[in-house]
Image (cartoon, coloured by chain):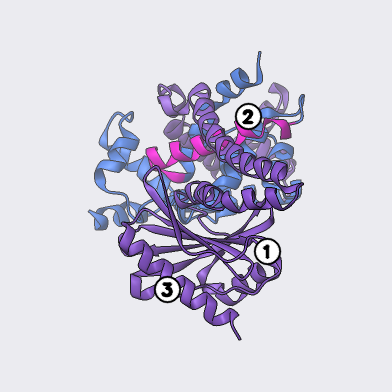
Amino acid sequence: MTPDPFSEAELQAWVDGRLTPDQTRAVEQWLDANPDAAKRWRGYRQDAAALNHLFDPVLAEPLPRRLHPDVIRARSWQRQALRAAAAIVLIAVGAAGGWLAHGDRMDRQIAARSLPADAVAAHRVFVSEVRHPVEVTADQEGHLVAWLSKRLGKSIRAPRLTDQGFELMGGRLLSAAEGPAAQLMYQNAEGRRLTLYVRDAADGGDTAFRIEKEGGVSAFYWIDQGLGYALIGDLDRDRLLAAANKVYRDLSDVRRP
Amino acid sequence: MSVTREIETHIPSLRRFARALCHDVHLADDLVQDTLERALTRLFQWRRGSNLRAWLFTILRNQFLNGRRTRYAPPTTLAAEQWDALLTHLPDQTARLEAMDLMRALDRLTEEQRETILLVGLEGFSYDEAARILDVPQGTVMSRLSRGREALRQLMDRNGPPKLREVSSNDS
């Protein structure tokens, strides 16, 4: 058997119709004279044609609206705008804090008063997050608590709210005027979420529980041993107070020797 | 022509390639939509003057690799009406059966052979372009093409016993 006069690459190019007319003619004359080779290579060409026959009609189909670049672009702008809006809330929290931070005791007290406002703002941003509500999930609770304690410079732990029907989802680190702030998120069986916001309040002095209502959510907040706490949720006052009491007990347990 | 308008001219062939990968019309369009979203938000990554069509196919192919077992996974066996929806343009029952044989044969190739055959044979990319899209040397494209085409020919063997035809009648 004589070797094929054409290389594999040339013959594949013939299948794809990429040879010059002269080369094509030469290949086809050779195929006419070599039935075995012809069976193989013309078979490839037949399959290639069948693929085109099967899928080429897609090219003529009208484009569905959702695939128009302008529609896609408008949608991704909307998403970016939402993300930007969330970022602005955070920057505003940070900027207000920054202005308050450079000051004396008076400023500190004002900053302590901004605790519920900051906590509510952070609550609103993250509580509606479906995909990334927390940075570190509850299955790594040890790591989460160690990390947040380290960043806050004070030891905290995640209170148990199981009796109140809420399970820990996880937490994240935020920044506030006074430095880092921790947010822990809990969820109950109905999918309602609570957040516990904790940050430094060294100059604040201990306070009793206070409650503030802002647009549908209630915040219980207090200062205890140099840390400010705010518990926020879309719950009625009594249930939220019960949860806040539990948080207070759990956290003072760990912090009082 | 703006880049966006230029992208628009490539959407029909992106849809054709996606249809051949996913079979299902809606999954394929999901894949194209995801591809276009990525492309339009990452236009800054495209080097002006480089091959826009190859860049789009690279994104689509990577997107498919990431989601082929989840987001774009076709149902294991397509229902009769799904086949019909794919094949409405074919004139008669014989043509439809042949088309089904071809799709089943494509499915039996290795993933590497299938994507290579589709990029080179169906989409007309050069071996060099296909090598870049698939991120392999050109020699690898050549050998996948040879082996894939031979495997496809044997699966489609028009003179042999109609083995795939039997598979399709068992399904129904």
* Secondary structure under the numbered disc 1 in the rendered image: loop
Q: Main secondary structure of the magenta part?
A: helix
Q: Which chain is blue?
A: B
Residue that mark 3 sits on: A246
Position of A162 with respect to B155 (left or right) is left
The reply to whether label 3 and label 2 mark residues of one chain is yes
Drawing shade for chain A: purple
Whichever of labels 1 and 3 marks the residue nearer the N terminus, that label is 1
Q: Which residues are magenta?
A: B22-46
* Chain letter of disc 2 in the image: A
Q: Which residue is mark 2?
A: A17
Residue B54, position as x, y percentages in the image: 67, 34
Which residue is found at the position 58% from the left and 40% from the top?
A89
Q: Circles 2 and 1: CB distance less than 8 Å?
A: no
Q: Is residue A119 above or below residue B92?
A: below
The disc labelled 3 sits on which kind of residue?
A: Lys
